[in-house]
Amino acid sequence: MSATNHDAFWMPFTANRQFRRTPRMLVAADGMYYTADDGRRVLDGCAGLWCVNAGHNRPRITEAVQKTIATLDFAPTFQMGHPLGFAAADRIAALAPGDLNHVFFCNSGSEAADTALKIAIAYHRVRGDAARTRLIGRERGYHGVGFGGISVGGISGNRKLYGGLLTGVDHLPHTHDLARNAFSKGLPEHGAELADTLERIVALHDPSTIAAVMVEPMAGSTGVLPPPVGYLRRLREICDKYGILLIFDEVITGFGRLGGPAFAAEKFGVIPDIMTCAKGVTNGTIPMGAAIVREHVHAAFMDGPESGIELPHGYTYSGHPVACAAAIATLDTYAEENLFARADDLAPYFEEAAHALRGLPHVVDIRNVGLVAGIELEPRPGAPGARAYETFDRAFRKGVLVRYTGDVIAVSPPLIIEKAQIDQLFGTIADIVRTLD
Ligand SMILES: Cc1ncc(COP(=O)(O)O)c(C=O)c1O
C-alpha cells in the first residue's frame, strides 16, 4: 500500500487535513539546514522543535548512538543498572546549578513534568505532610501533554477536550502585558508584582494544602514570554515562606537556549527545588527527559527501610543506554564548542535583528532573550492565527523553518547559527510579514 496519501500517520499538534493538501516534508538534516523532499535546503530557525541546540548531524553524537546501540541496545533500570545511566546522570547533575544533584530519567518533557509533579506531592507525603497535594501552575504555561502537565499548564486549547483533569489545581496569572511591556528587549520591566498573586492563592487554599508551584522560567510554547525582572525571585521567596516546592520546567530553556549558563535557573539566579529538562539534553537525537531534584528533596525519600522502593515511579526506557550515550556525547559537544557562551555572545546581534522587524505591518510586539525571539502579529479579524500560520508556511517554501503558536512566530535556532543566517532568518520573516493581508 502506498504511503503517499499520508493517511495513516495521525500527526501531533497538526492540522492533519490541511497538511495532507500541502505537505511540508523533511528528508535530511545537517548543521543549520534541513533538506526538504524536493531537494531544497531549509534553514532551521527553531532547532527542530527547540531541541537541536548543537545543530544537526553532529558526528560525536551519531557515533555514540551507533556504538551504544551495537553494544547495549537495551538494559532495564528497574533494580538493574548500566554505567552509561550513572555517567549521564552525573554529567547532567554537574551542569545543573546549586544542589540540583539527583536525576530521575524519563523520555520526554511531558513525562518530566508529570514526574516532577508526582515527586513534589510524594515529597510532602513522605515527610508526613500528606495534606499538601495542591499544584499551582500558570495561565499560558506549557508542561507537555500528560494529565499532570495539561492540568497545571494553562493553555486552554490543550485542556478543553480532556474532561475534568486533575483536581486541586490553581493557576497564577500569565505575565504577558502588551500595554506595558511591548517591544521589551530582554526581560520586561513590568510584572514582578504578578508573582504576589501566589500570596492570594495561598491565602485562599491555605499553605498547608499546597505542594508545589510549577512554571517555565521563560514560557516558550505559549509564544515566548520572558519573565518580568524580579518575578522569579519573588515566586521563590513566597514558596520559601510557605514551605511550597518550586518547580522550573526547563524543557525549552535548558542547555544554553537563553545564553550563558546551561539553565535559566542559573542565568536568573533563582534555584528551584525540582527542575525538568528534555529536548536539548540529547540534541533531539534520542528521546530523553529528566526531573532533577535538590538534595533535600532526594533526602526526604531516603529514609525508610533500605529494601523499600523509595519512589514507585519510572518508565521502561528511563535511562535508556542509547539515550544516555547520546546525552553524554551531546554535553561533550556543547562543552567542546562552548556553545552556551556562543549563544550569549550572539544574543545582542540576534536581538537587534529581531527588533528590526518593529514597525512592519501587523507586528504588535517583539520579545527576546538569549537565542529566542517571539514576533507577535495582530490577529486577522475573524481568523486568529492565520497570519502566523501563513508566515510559517511561506517561510518554509522560501527555505526557512520557524514555529508559530497563535499569532506569535517563534524563532529559536541552533546555537551554532552564524550572523548571516540570523539575517536570512529575520529577513525572510520580514519579507513575508510585509506582504500579509
Ligand atoms: C516547557 C515545556 N515542558 C514540556 C514540554 C513537553 O515536552 P515533550 O513534547 O518532549 O513531551 C515542552 C515541549 O515543548 C515544553 O516546552
Image: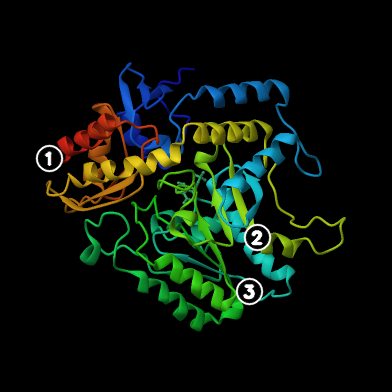
Helix, strand or loop under label 1: helix
Which mark sits nearer the N-terminus, 2 or 1? 2
Query: How far apart are the two marked residues, 1 and 3, measured between alpha carbons?
Result: 52 Å
| Residue 209 locus on image (x, y percent) | 60, 77
Which mark sits nearer the N-terminus, 3 or 2? 2
Helix, strand or loop under label 2: helix
| Residue 18 locus on image (x, y percent) | 32, 35
Q: Residues within 10 Å of mark 1 (few under 14, many from 20)?
A: few
Q: Which residue is mark 2?
A: 119
Point 48% across, 29% down: residue: 8
Query: How far apart are the two marked residues, 2 and 1, measured between alpha carbons?
Result: 48 Å
Which mark sits nearer the N-terminus, 1 or 3? 3
Q: Which residue is mark 3?
A: 132
Q: Residues within 10 Å of mark 3 (few under 14, many from 20)?
A: many
Mark 3: which amino acid? Arg
* Residue 411 seen anywhere in this rendered image of the structure: no
Q: Which residue is mark 1?
A: 434
Point 33% across, 40% down: residue: 346
